[in-house]
Amino acid sequence: MTSRTFHAAILRNAAVLVPAPRRADWLAEWNAELCYIDRDATAFCLGSFRDALWLRCHTPGAIRRMFSMDSPLRCVLFLVSLVALTLSLIFPFRDLWRPLWSPPGAEQFALAILQMYLVALLVLAALWPPSLGDYPADPSGPSVKIRLRRWIFLAAKFVLLTPIPIFLSVALLPVFPGAPSILMFVWIFGFRWVLADQRRRCPVCLHFLSNPVTIGSPSQSVLGRYGTELACPHGHGVLYVPGAPTTWSSRQRWQYLSS
Amino acid sequence: MLHSYTARVTSSAKLSHTAAMILQAIHAGHVYGFSVMETTGLPSGTVYPALRRLERDGLIGSQWESQRIADADQRPARKYYRITPAGKITLQASRMRYPLLARLFPVSAGGKA
């Protein structure tokens, strides 16, 4: 790798921190300046990280956008990083929780975990309807592959969320012996978040729906529609969320814009 | 209105020594980032964020060099910075605060002072 390629690579890496609308301009400026550097080019390029970070911190909404889970990939990556983080937390206490994995303790531990997991699912189903809403089958709608992707995404969130409270409770065990007792509650609220997150995503592109518009008024809920409509930013469809559940419209309803 | 103007001028006049140095360097005719770095002796990680801050506060403005000029010189186009009228007022106030500032980088004959 030549030094020029190396320095350009440093700048490209720093550019990742710069908010997207300003990235091209920022990179062009740094690359132009780099052409005039005849010594300490590496130190010069490393300074770009500070500049990029400054821009990231001082662009309104840039930090929020950085941690936004609008994209399904970002959401999965967020959960994967949470799993990794909680797993890394239990390593310093591995001597304490080793008995849990030995044959007599492991069975009891697994049984207790399974019991709590099932109770959490039951409580969730009893407290909040697990339905995702009405997504009518449309011949001109998305292909089976795209529809399947939505369910895989939902399953991935459930699978990734499951070990997080277990690792967290094991990590907290030395400082808070009652940590496993809160396991069930963390699952309940975690799974509730998974369902809520799934409901506010487009079934086609799996991005968050946007532009909520209130339609009707509470007094019109008998004869007309009263609720909120959200649209997919990529134009795949519109979601109607009833403001007051009625017998004929109690669940949110998706409508493909192609239909 | 006058109160908000006074407040803005007073707050912008309170530049750090580094920011005042960079503003003075631009005023003295060092109009691009690397030139400011060489003149002030400050590292790139200090100069460029300071330039962004000064630009955000309206004390300097920036403009890309014409691609035609850059192509004629066979080099990439640079981004040039220039001091704004508000920047000149702030620099004047900063000189009162840091009296040696003007002597550090005197305005050259070719400068835009």
Image (cartoon, rainbow, N blue to C red):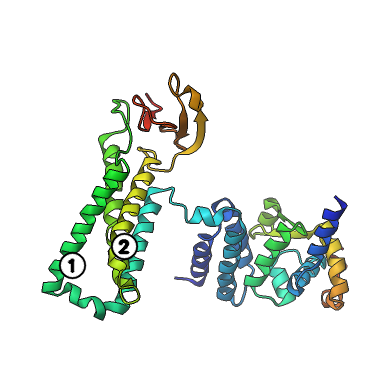
Of residues B85 and A97, the one drawn nearer to the viewer in this rendering: A97
- Callout 2: 10 Å neighbours few (<14), some, many (20+)? few
Q: First in sequence, mark 2 or 1: give its number.
A: 1
Q: Dot 1: what SS? A: helix
Label 2 marks which chain's residue? Answer: A
Mark 2 lies on residue: A182
The Cα–Cα distance between marks 2 and 1, rounded to whole angstroms, is 15 Å
Q: The N terminus of chain A is located in which quarter?
A: bottom left
In the orientation shown, which residue stands out farthest toward the bottom? Answer: A95
Residue A178 spot, x, y in % from top left: 30, 69
Residue A222 left/right relative to A118: right
Tell me what residue is drawn at x 86 percent, y 72 percent: B95
- Image disc number at residue A109: 1
Q: Dot 2: what SS? A: helix
Residue A39 spot, x, y in % from top left: 61, 77
Of residues A28 and B100, the one drawn nearer to the viewer in this rendering: B100
Label 1 marks which chain's residue? Answer: A
Which image quadrant for residue A209? top left
Identify which amino acid the numbered label 1 is placed on: Phe
Q: The C terminus of chain A is located in which quarter?
A: top left
Q: Is residue B81 above or below residue A136?
A: below
Residue A245 spot, x, y in % from top left: 39, 31
Of residues B33 and A149, the one drawn nearer to the viewer in this rendering: A149
